[in-house]
Structures are given as structure tokens and as C-alpha cells.
């Protein structure tokens, strides 16, 4: 291991298989998720009720949680096989966005992509589009990651735009960052999550799904 290289532990807890970077080995009282913001595998599924509140699927909920960021990811091989999947949540204590956590230099995806050379594609499903606000720099971190791993393509599906309306001081940065990401097509694809994609995501990343919400055939596809 190189000096200064971060280590990540993946291990089973009562909260599922979690990833614990060395720098977060403390619990804090203001963020209920710390230090378990990244979870992997089947244990990373979230209950339907939470999925619905955050993604507003299958119908927009009036109780959508404003400050909750939820991101699901899939790592696929060059042949398209899902190698790993999981989710990441924002940290309310350190004010970190999940995409910033995953893509930062020395972060989890950096470590995983470095270790597994057959990662051909990363797919992200987010409730909010990536931002490029000064304290987060999510889009810049994503771009730097892609420059480092140029063989990896990235597909981003989001449920709603984040801070791009005129009322936000940061709207211009966020809009420009999304344009620059889109301009990397076909290396990067950026689009709203379509209904079919929502159903796929729910089948693959949710649980306790009411029977009437989805036909079984959707989950078999
Ligand atoms: Zn936290
Ligand atoms: Zn962000």
C-alpha cells in the first residue's frame, strides 16, 4: 500500500454491508447515518417508503424530504455484468453530498476502480442532479475521476434538478456544470430517470414493495 493511501473496510453489521473509511471512525450525534454513508450489496436496499419519499415514485409525494440526498450506484464490467451495487447518503453533520463522497480523490470509487480493472461502466441513480457548489464540487470530482479512469463510462439518472432555479445563488454554477457534463456524451450520459428506470431501480434496490406498485414481470426483466 502506498503511504497515505486510504483504506476502506467493507463488513457486515446490523445495518448491512457498510463501507467505513478510516477518517469516519466516529459516531456523531447530529447525523444518524455516520459513519455508514456507503452501503454495498443486497443489504444496501432501502425500504419502499423511503424510496418513495426521496424519489417521488410512482407519484410525487407531498412529504418529499428536501435535504435528503440518496444515490444508488452500479459498477458494471465491460461486458455489462453488474459487478457491485450499493447506495450512498448525504452527511448532515459534515454537509457532504453522496456523489462528492463517492468520487473524491482517494474516495471509495477511486479505491474500487483502481482495484478492479474490469470496471467498464458506472451507473448512478440520484434523487438530485449533481451540483458544483463550492463546498461540494460534485461535478468537478466526477470529471476528475473520469479523467483518471478514461476507459470507464458513466450514466447518470436523476429524479429532480438540484438548485438550478433562478432563486438560488449557485444556480449558474450548477447549470453550467450540468452542461459541461452533458457535453462529454457519449462518455457520460445525463438524463432524468424515466418511469421504466424507476421501476428497475425499485426492483433492484428497494424492499417491502407493495404488490400493486409493480408487476412481477417488471422485476424479472
Ligand atoms: Zn454523517
Ligand atoms: Zn453536490
Image: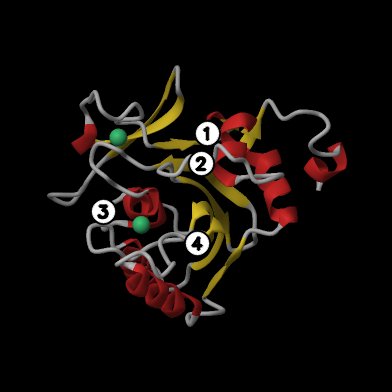
Which label number is shown at residue 86?
Answer: 2
Colour scheme = secondary structure
Viewer-closest of 85 and 119: 85
Mark nearest the camera among 4 and 3 is: 4
Question: For the residue carrying disc 1, how many other residues have a C-alpha within 10 Å: few (<14), some (14-19), or many (20+)?
Answer: many
Residue placed at 13% from the left, 49% from the top? Answer: 4
* Residue closer to the observer: 66 or 215: 66
The numbered mark at residue 106 is 3
Label 1, on which residue? 44
Q: Is residue 221 above or below residue 8?
A: below
Dot 2 and dot 4 residues touching (CB under 8 Å): no
Q: CA distance from mark 4 to mark 1?
A: 24 Å
User: Are discs 1 and 2 less than 8 Å apart at CB?
Assistant: yes
* Residue appearing at x 63%, y 35% in the figure: 206
Query: 207 left or right of 94?
Result: right
Q: Residue furthest front?
A: 167
Mark in front: 4 vs 1: 4
Dot in front, 2 or 4 = 4
Around disc 4, counting alpha carbons within 10 Å, would you say few (fewer than 14), some (14 to 19), or many (20 or more)?
some
Q: Which residue is mark 4?
A: 161
Discs 1/3, front: 1
The residues bearing labels 2 and 3 have C-alpha atoms spaced at a distance of 18 Å
Q: Earlier in the sequence, mark 4 or mark 3?
A: 3
Amino acid at each position: 500500500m502506498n503511504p497515505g493511501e486510504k483504506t476502506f473496510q467493507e463488513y457486515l453489521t446490523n445495518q448491512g454491508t457498510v463501507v467505513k473509511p478510516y477518517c469516519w471512525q466516529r459516531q456523531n450525534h447530529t447525523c444518524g447515518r455516520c459513519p455508514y454513508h456507503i452501503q454495498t450489496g443486497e443489504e444496501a436496499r432501502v425500504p419502499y417508503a423511503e424510496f418513495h419519499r426521496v424519489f417521488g415514485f410512482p407519484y410525487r409525494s407531498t412529504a418529499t424530504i428536501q435535504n435528503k440526498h440518496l444515490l444508488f450506484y452500479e459498477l458494471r464490467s465491460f461486458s455489462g455484468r453488474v459487478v457491485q451495487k450499493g447506495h450512498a447518503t448525504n452527511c448532515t453533520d459534515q454537509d457532504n453530498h453522496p456523489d462528492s463522497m463517492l468520487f473524491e480523490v482517494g474516495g471509495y470509487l477511486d479505491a474500487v476502480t483502481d482495484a478492479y480493472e474490469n470496471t467498464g461502466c458506472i451507473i448512478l441513480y440520484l434523487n438530485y442532479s449533481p451540483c458544483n457548489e463550492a463546498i461540494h464540487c460534485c461535478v468537478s470530482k466526477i470529471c476528475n475521476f473520469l479523467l483518471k479512469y478514461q476507459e470507464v463510462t458513466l450514466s447518470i439518472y436523476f429524479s429532480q434538478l438540484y438548485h438550478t432555479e433562478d432563486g438560488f445563488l449557485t444556480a449558474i454554477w450548477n447549470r453550467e456544470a450540468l452542461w459541461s457534463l452533458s457535453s462529454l456524451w457519449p462518455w457520460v450520459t445525463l438524463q432524468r430517470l424515466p418511469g421504466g428506470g424507476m421501476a428497475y431501480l425499485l426492483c433492484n434496490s428497494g424492499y417491502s414493495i407493495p404488490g400493486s406498485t409493480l408487476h412481477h414481470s417488471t422485476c424479472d426483466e
